[in-house]
Image (cartoon, rainbow, N blue to C red):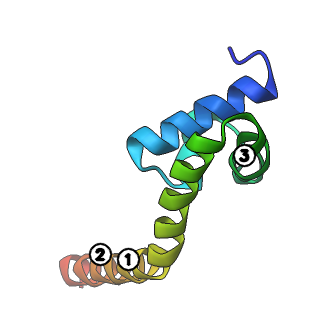
Amino acid sequence: MIDTVEQRAQLLGAYIAEEGATVRQAAQQFGISKSTVHKDVSTRLRRLNPALYREVRAILDVNKSERHIRGGMATKKKYELLTQAKEQHG
């Protein structure tokens, strides 16, 4: 159990740094909203642990720059699966 928002911010930062996780992945792992993760790692972590904040910020910047690619890949996969399903049933 996480006792304070400060501890949560530190844990989230460590998780993102170690795993290279996205905000969405961290939110799912900790059972909290994406907004909370973003607030914790962008505001609270900056004040609590500037070195970890810079590391997390770099990872999140990479994730942000790649998200359009991941979105396109997810859409491609979705339509490939739909095509396969049609071929099997049609």
Q: CA distance from mark 3 to mark 1?
A: 38 Å
Residue labelled with disc 3? 46
The one nearer the camera, 43 or 71, is 43
Q: Is residue 13 above or below residue 25?
A: above
Dot 3 amino acid type: Arg
Q: Is residue 27 among what the camera can see?
A: no
**Local SS, label 3:** helix
Q: Callout 2: few (<14), some (14-19), or many (20+) C-alpha neighbours within 10 Å?
A: few
Quarter assignment of residue 27? top right
Task: Tell me which amino acid carries mark 1.
Answer: Lys
Left or right side of 87 for 63: right
Q: Are marks 2 and 1 in contact (CB under 8 Å)?
A: yes
The residue that disc 2 covers is 81
- The residue shown at (28%, 81%) is 80
Residue 3 picture location, percent across and down: 77, 15
> Residue sitting at 54 percent across and 67 percent down?
61
Residue 58 versus residue 39 in the image, above or below: below
Residue 50 in the image, given as x and y percentages of width and height = 66, 43
Quadrant housing the C terminus: bottom left
